[in-house]
Amino acid sequence: MSQQVDININQLFIDKFSDFEHQLNGQKTLPIHDLRKKALHKFKELGIPNSHEEYKYTNFKKALTKNFTFNQLFKSKNDSSSFGNDYIINELEGNVLVFINGQFSESDSHFKSDEIDIKPLANAYSENPDTIAQHFGNYSKNNEDSYALLNSTYCNNGVFAQIGKNKIVNTPIIIYYISDARADEAVSFPRNLIVAESGSESSIIEVYSTIGEKNSFSNAVTEIVVEENAILNYFKILNETEHVYHVGLTQASQKKNSTINAHSYTFGGGIIRNNLHIAQEDENCTTNMFGLYLLNGNSHIDNHTEVDHKRPNSYSNELYKGILDEKSTGVFNGKIFVRREAQKTNAFQSNKNILLTNDATINSKPQLEIWADDVKCSHGCTTGQMDEEALFYLRARGIDKDKARAMLLYAFSIDVLKNVTIEPLKKYLDHIIAQRFNQEEL
Amino acid sequence: MLNITNLKASVEGKEILKGINLEVKPGEVHAIMGPNGSGKSTLASVLAGREEYNVDGGEVSFNGDDLLELSPEDRAREGVFLAFQYPIEIPGVSTTNFLKTAVNQVREYRGLEALDAVSFLSIMKEKMKLVEIDQSLLSRPLNEGFSGGEKKRNEIFQMAMLAPTLAILDETDSGLDIDALRIVANGVNKLKSEKNATIVVTHYQRLLDYIVPDFVHVLYNGKIVKSGTKELAMELEEKGYDWIKEEANSVV
Ligand SMILES: Nc1ncnc2c1ncn2[C@@H]1O[C@H](COP(=O)(O)OP(=O)(O)OP(=O)(O)O)[C@@H](O)[C@H]1O
Ligand SMILES: [Mg+2]
């Protein structure tokens, strides 16, 4: 039975490729197309993972087979006029690029290309062939991860941004990926390439949201290169409903003395898998990873992070926190590699979870592999119920139980938020968190 | 005000309070002393409504109401305050916000209007002076990284803010330096009135020089085995608990 299902979904993705090629028109002649074909070839070998180790706890196969027809795979739905702009983060100014079901929506986007070379990726295939050739597909785990392969096969658009040497850019790049699932299921394969040239400083914010009640599936890949002495702040925010399936890989490559601050916020979703892979290619790199997930219903979230320390004197710090309510499930897998040459590396990891019901579960797995001997590494995972003693303390001062509970959960969450330095974004996230716990009060 | 009759309580199946009787009237100060592990904090916790303690028998009435029926928050709103022996740290919750929420929830329960930020702050300033607590402590997360003495002082500050009718101070004196002890005791005395009462749990006569009790009770093995006036505390200071234990054990 299940064998039958396997063949179907894999075959479907393979068969759809000719339709996809067909609607690409002229783009088929670009070098990028060879990469697509290569990726498809490799995908044929691997297929959608079933009980494969890396996706052991997060199996999309059933969900994709059961909930999607993929009939609308490449039909562009590009009508944003009818759904307003609720998806926009208030007061957050910057270079805005909006994609609806994977298609670039020019009328909703506004950006300036003076400080940053920024454009829809589809334009960069022909306009920036050298940068594309140098970086595209070099950082995503192209040959290892089936979903990244699927993205490489079908990706058409996303954001290309190249932050020039020594440019300190204060306005963030904000990418809104909207799934319009009102009339029909929505499927998209967003793809971004971000190159932060040496000495530059910039921020990228990816926001995923869905409109409508039908199912949506997005399979995203973001490739990031942070060159010498550059600083990049990266945010990925998913504020989704239970009809949403998302798998995304963010793959960053850091050069000497560079810093990346990666933030991940997930507020709901059907099945969500965030892969964050950061490779420190050279000395003196700093990597910060902050994550928060607040789930209820039947939501399932899986955060897989990996930081690879390859050279000496590097630093990484990771703090992921989650609150799981009702029947939600969570997975945290944090890999830290410290290669033999990466002496004097400091690596810290912490994953803390609160389970609010007996039905909520979390599977937290730190995975430290250390080949160097002169390193400082620590990791800690805690999973528990609400802190009853703290709850009693607040109640003993006259605060009612629900309010006390909300205060404590809010405090637990806000701990992650203090690392966000973009004020309007912080306010937005704070609002979602506060609202989440007030809703519980009703 | 408070009437405890034959109160029995256990935790995790272990019987700790074995029939407590105590009456506290408005304006009175009662001291409860007794050896370690005799059940003093358990009594305080049961009165404050900690859920892990099972009440196995007896009654507690507070101003005519059945106290044991009320949730911890409603007990606080009715005017019961427990200064914890070991105040816990609550990271991420700002002391000021916490107190503002508490004060306003208590006010709401009593049919009073919520305080706005300005009036809250002015009351806070006034009470800060009373217990000589520093502003810098209050802008920090609740008790986080506070020294032992600072935590105790914060308890009394919270008491001042909430103006309870029955304050139960569980070893508020331990961990305080000599000056702090005097300051805290002064604070407690200033908050005293004919309408409210105080129960002080302590091991040391020294505190009772400042907060002078009307009655002193000795709790031993889950029961009040001896009651007297402040002279009893002095006798205990001098002679220890052996003679009390002997007396109590021979009665059985
Ligand atoms: N949660 C609990 N689980 C198990 N035993 C408990 C618990 N709480 C209290 N006890 C036990 O109950 C007894 C009374 O404890 P309690 O804290 O009331 O004593 P106390 O009189 O306040 O002592 P101290 O003077 O040391 O503060 C002790 O033997 C203690 O170990
Ligand atoms: Mg005690």
Image (cartoon, coloured by chain):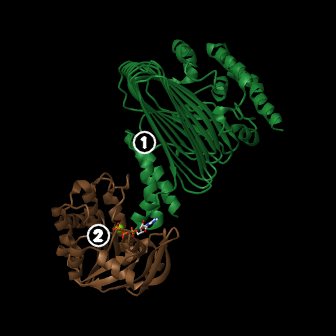
Where's residue A268, x and y in %?
A: 57, 47
| Residue at 66% in and 41% down | A216
Q: Are marks 2 and 1 on the same chain?
A: no
Q: Which residue type carries mark 1? A: Leu
Instruction: Write down which chain is painted brown.
Output: B
Choose top left, top right, bottom left or bottom right for residue A346.
Answer: top left
Q: Amino acid at mark 2?
A: Met
Label 1 Cα neighbours within 10 Å, binned few <14 / some 14-19 / many ≥20: some
Q: Secondary structure at mark 1?
A: helix
Place of residue A329 in the rendered image (x, y in percent of width and height, measured from the top left) = 61, 47
What chain is the green one?
Answer: A
Marks 2 and 1 sit apart, C-alpha to C-alpha, by 38 Å
Chain at tag 1: A
Q: Is residue A70 above or below residue A409?
A: above
Callout 1: CB less than 8 Å from ligand 1: no
The residue under the point 34% across, 82% down is B247
Q: Quadrant of the N terminus of chain B?
A: bottom left
Give the labeled residue for mark 1. A425
Can you tell which quarter of the image residue A347 is in? top left
- Is residue B155 shown left or right of residue A362? left
